[in-house]
Amino acid sequence: MAVLLARLDRRVTPYLLVAPFFVLFGAFGLYPAARTAWMSLYDWDLLDGPVAFTGWANYAALFADPGFYRALANTASIFVAATVPQLLCALGVAALLDRPLRGSAVWRAVVLLPNVVPVVAVALVFAQLFGRDQGLVNWVLSGFGADPVDWRAHAWSAHLGVAVMVAWRWTGYNALLYLAAMRAVPRELHEAAELDGASRWRAFRSVTLPSIRPTLLFTAVVATIGGFQLFTEPTLFGGADGGADRQFQTLVMYLYEAGFERFDAGYAAAVSWVLFALCAVLALVNAALLRRAVRGG
């Protein structure tokens, strides 16, 4: 009997220990996703529930909707403007912090500081910086003889403003991830590169970057998902409608408008599934491109 209990314990206990995770994942991950997929096949009013089964009609309407393509273009523009400089700057900051510095712990804390500031406070600060009449950025531009810019009125300026806000928040966070990965690179590799006469840039490109490739892939995938789910920063920057002409309305803001302003939950569910597919495809493409770039280095 004791042998049977011991064998049962060895086989069952590991599953019991990990079961809570799968229960929570099923309840808060799989079930909402499956229900959203089901809702997307219905004409579904947010308040009254399902009205009629429509099949793929919501997806057909979505792919014929100019508003969807405008939101997709806005999202892609802000994503590129925010993510590419953000990751490059984070890599540079991490490389600097990886060198011997006096007060390195303080510098690391300073780098992480923007990420711990509440996003509402960040939005308030940047709203003042990009103010049309008394903003600091316009004041600096006027010093060079440039005319003041109404940052929320134009697509390019609004995208730039939101991108700066996003980059400011997440550059330090990514820099610390890169720094942790750089510290794990064996010093013998750097010493061997130095003995071979490699320059600092050559050693960074041929030793450091390939060694931290998993972290680069991770940040690229996370940044892609986060960039295409952007909602808080543009909403606080200029309102949930994304501007008078929807000039900085992102896909998630478009989803919010469909679901919670027009109460068209079926259409909003279709948007969410298309957004999920876009995030998955772009994350895979980013990972493949980055893997090839690092190998090429």
Image (spheres, rainbow, N blue to C red):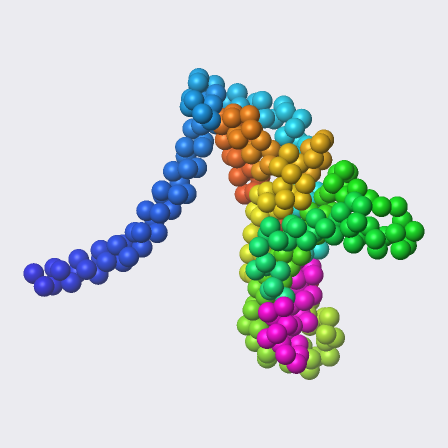
Looking at the image, which is closer to me, 153 or 83? 153
Magenta stretch: includes residue 261? no
Q: What's the residue at 36%, 43% (across, down)?
A: 26
Image quadrant in which the C terminus is located: bottom right
Q: Residue furthest right?
A: 145
Q: What's the residue at 12%, 59% (across, down)?
A: 4
The vertical placement of 32 against 94, above or below, is above
Q: What's the residue at 47%, 26% (across, down)?
A: 46
Q: What's the residue at 63%, 44% (across, down)?
A: 236
Q: Position of residue 141 (x, y in %)?
A: 85, 52
User: 66 left or right of 259?
Assistant: right
Q: Position of residue 92 (x, y in %)?
A: 69, 65
User: 17 left or right of 160?
Assistant: left
Q: Quadrant of residue 295?
A: bottom right
Q: Which span of residues is magenta-colored?
A: 87-110
The vertical placement of 161 against 55, above or below, is below
Q: Position of residue 227 (x, y in %)?
A: 61, 46
User: 3 left or right of 123?
Assistant: left
Q: Position of residue 265 (x, y in %)?
A: 49, 27
Looking at the image, which is closer to me, 156 or 211? 156
Q: Residue furthest top?
A: 52
Q: Quadrant of residue 173?
A: bottom right
Q: Quadrant of residue 191?
A: bottom right
Magenta stretch: includes residue 109? yes
Q: Residue furthest front?
A: 134
Image quadrant in which the N terminus is located: bottom left
User: 46 left or right of 78?
Assistant: left
Q: Is residue 66 visible?
A: yes
Q: Is residue 157 visible?
A: no
